[in-house]
Image (tube, rainbow, N blue to C red):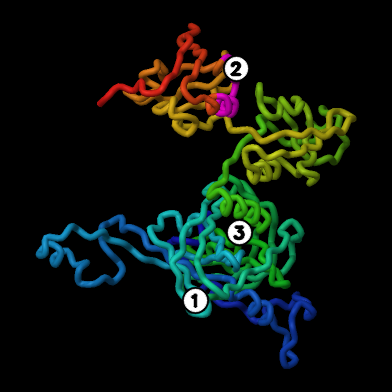
Amino acid sequence: MKRAVGLAGVVLAAGLLASPPPAFPGIPVSAFAQMQGLPTLAPVIKAVAASVVSITVRAEAADGKSTSPGDVMDDPLMRDLLHLPVAPQYRTFAAGSGVIINAVNGYIVTNYHVIKDAEEINVDLVDGRHFRAKLAGADPDTDVALIQISAANLSGIPLGDSDALNVGDFVLAIGNPFGIGQTVTSGIVSGLNRNHMGLEGYEDFIQTDASINPGNSGGALVNLRGELVGINTAIVDVMGGNAGIGFAIPVNMVRAISVQLEKYGSVERGELGFAMSALTPDAAKKAHVPAGSTGVVVTKVDEHSAAERAGVKPGDVVTAIGGTPVQDVPDLRNRLALLRVGDAVELTVLRGSRRISVRAVIDEPAWRAIDGIEITELLDGAVFTNTAFGADPKGVQVATVRSGSNAWASGLREGDILTSVNSRRVIALDQFVTEAGKAVERLNLEVIRNGEKLLLQIRMNQAQPG
């Protein structure tokens, strides 16, 4: 698998332009508008073309050589003659495409891999206007990024429902392949829910045979109603050529991620705290659930986790989340990945012959670390995390302490396990943040160090000079 950006050996002549309708005799005439007696997709394309943009990025050159034209002051000899500092060298290249999803506020969605190394992001509209964009937020795990431009009279694209797609639905891919300008290709949805591609942390791709090439990344996959159903992301590359297998991130995932990126700039993923496995026929029989059921089997529930607090038990079969049926492990994993820490979620669970609903609140992941200064100045210099799963005692661990800091001078050391804050028991990082955040002048901590219990009092201005 290779992405649709930066591919080597791609056959340039492969599927660059949309084929006329006769090339797809199976497309019903009713799917096309009629112009002068001829079927055409032109009205659909005209309606959405202005929503798809070209993205060019400017990044520092790894080899120290500029590949973009500069003025005379960029010449190293001239700068040396005038005793000026060495000018940074940059390379400029057409990175990919983007789609305007909010015309009022100028938000454009694209792939993270399109802009990840950018020092500068530039956007070109189909009407010839050019804008400098700023990064609003990015989520590398789903390869989604949100950029923003300040512009009037933008054209946003309506968002469809990727869950309503069927294999065989006709789609159009719109983008800027190879930097040649906006190009439209057509095809069908060839497959759904493709995962295990090894491209992103969370995968639920739409597969299409609409030609996708380098530069199409971040562009639009639209249905024949002119609705965005996916963001084009990757292709299968065989012997340096496009094999007619492309992948797009479904718009429902893009929508959920974009909302978080607009509001927070990132996705703060948490966890429910249970391990799961596939619901095979043997597993269904063992769990005493009806044959043909879909879902996942809970194999382990972490101690003190959100799942344990909600009442989830090993052997439960999770069949739905938020009322939407769960198909398999990747499906549930992807749906949970769209939730933030603190979000509430309702799970439908089969426990033998009983169907029950449980409500859980997404918890902070066990591996999350937080800088003490984010909690209170009293803890400046220390970084905290949850203790490892199964650790005894359960609490909050000091990951690092900076020598000479207030936390260090107060006696905190790397490896300490904090089990109480101001006489209140804490077993997880979120509890610790809440209790310690109330402190103003001092903190009384109960600490386990090398198996021994210590009592520490944290006060301000205990840091040593120098």
Q: Residue at x 74, y 65 (%)?
A: 168
Please name whichever residue, 342 or 189, is drawn nearer the observer in this view of the structure: 342
Q: Residue at x 49, y 25 (%)?
A: 440
Q: Please, is residue 391 above or below residue 269 in the view?
A: above
Q: Amino acid at mark 2?
A: Arg
Is residue 74 shown to the viewer in this render?
A: yes
How crowded pointer 1 is (Cα within 10 Å; few <14, some 14-19, many 20+) is rated as few
How crowded pointer 3 is (Cα within 10 Å; few <14, some 14-19, many 20+) is rated as many
Disc with the residue nearer the chain's start (2 vs 3): 3
Number of dots carrying numbers: 3
429 drawn magenta: yes
Disc number at residue 247?
3
The quadrant in which residue 233 appears is: bottom right
Please name whichever residue, 44 or 100, is drawn nearer the observer in this view of the structure: 100
Mark closer to the observer (2, 3): 2
* SS at mark 3 in the image: strand
Drawn side of residue 332 relative to residue 69, left or right: right
Disc number at residue 424?
2
* SS at mark 1 in the image: loop
Q: Please, is residue 98 above or below residue 138 in the view?
A: below
Disc with the residue nearer the chain's start (2 vs 1): 1
Tell me the magenta residue range.
423-435
Mark closer to the observer (2, 1): 2
Q: What percent of the width, then of the height, locates residue 54? A: 49, 70
